[in-house]
Image: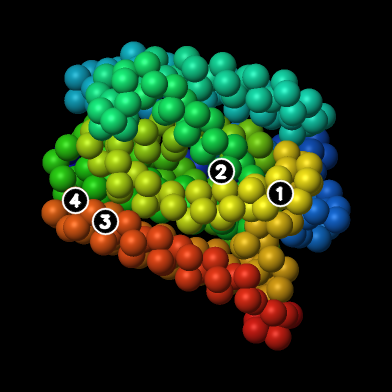
Amino acid sequence: MSWSLHIGLGLGACISAYLATGAVLRLLTVRAILDHANERSSHAGTVPRGGGIAVMAVIIAAWCALAWLAPGKLGDSFNITTIALLAAGLAGFSFLDDLRGLPTLQRLMMQLLAVALGCLALPDSPVFQGLLPPAADRLAAGFCWLWFLNLFNFMDGIDGITAVEGGSIGLGIVLITQISGQAGELGPLSAIAAGAVIGFGFLNWRPARIFLGDVGSVGLGFLLGWLLLSLAAAGHWLPALLLCLYYLADATWTLLRRMVRGEKFWQAHRSHFYQHAALACGDHSRIALMILACNMLLIAIALWTVLDGNQWLALILGGGTVAFLLWCFARMKPQDGME
């Protein structure tokens, strides 16, 4: 598929999401659906929460329309529609959590159900390149998917970070599928996802006028997880890993630390590397831009692997890039940045 198609879809989704987010912002303000700062927050004051309604609405509508208007060109239209509708249901359930808070177990069970059904809509090719028996491959893919959508939710803690990460993953998948000539059906879907989250990002940049909420972070985590697993199933397992490596490393390491300390790891906190850095320098934009720079390097390394670069060296370079950023965040002191 042509570059112009991807640019057009991404730009259209960006503009649509920006306008829809503005409309949702007004509605949330009138309804007083607000996020109030507390001891675990990285912001001050109250900000409307639930902007993910706009982002998810744009992505889901565009995916379904594209799947049925271009049958055959995007692979299995039924599977794409299934993923979009599962994401819609999961996002709707998460919005209830935004409104009144739901028990952790109840949220987990709903996520498990969505992922289990979603695994039926994954490509037939093995995600782990034949290293596991078919049943174990699907089970491992489901576990990774469940963890990814949760870590995507956990990492949505400062202004602009989700726009940066979601946009980077979407852009990376577009570039990889275009350059490799494989899994081209993922390109338009990724362009839409990237455009929509970037459109939201204009109103979520520091100082944020609106927050994504669980309706957006959980829903986006589900959709992006499916795209990454589908990319891996097409043979690009290392690029799929590299594209989300920063989020994966920060969230996983933080979770393990909290578990070792005996903390209630499922509760909201400010223990992530990026949260420490944001609190230290007082500037969310600076941290988001540092993550963006890291992600651009990861995309470049991922593209190198597609062009027959050494995979082990690429993994070392990607891991080193992420480790260096985490080290920088961990060492940040208030005097290192703006107050």
Residue that appears at 59% across and 37% down: 150
Specify the quadrant of the image occupied by residue 102.
top right
Report, in whole angstroms, how far the alpha carbon at label 3 lies from the one at label 4. 13 Å
Residue designated by label 3? 312
Name which of mark 3 and mark 4 comes first in the sequence: 4
x and y, in percent, of residue 22 in the image: 61, 45
Residue designated by label 2? 152
Q: Secondary structure at mark 1?
A: helix
Name which of mark 2 and mark 4 comes first in the sequence: 2
Residue designated by label 1? 260
Report, in whole angstroms, how far the alpha carbon at label 2 lies from the one at label 3. 26 Å
Q: Which amino acid type corresponds to the residue marked 3 in the rendered image?
A: Trp
Label 1 close to label 3 by CB (< 8 Å): no
Q: Residue 306's mark? A: 4
Counting the numbered discs, the total is: 4
Q: Which amino acid type corresponds to the residue marked 1 in the rendered image?
A: Val
Question: Which one is in front in this view, the residue at disc 3 or the one at disc 4?
Answer: 3
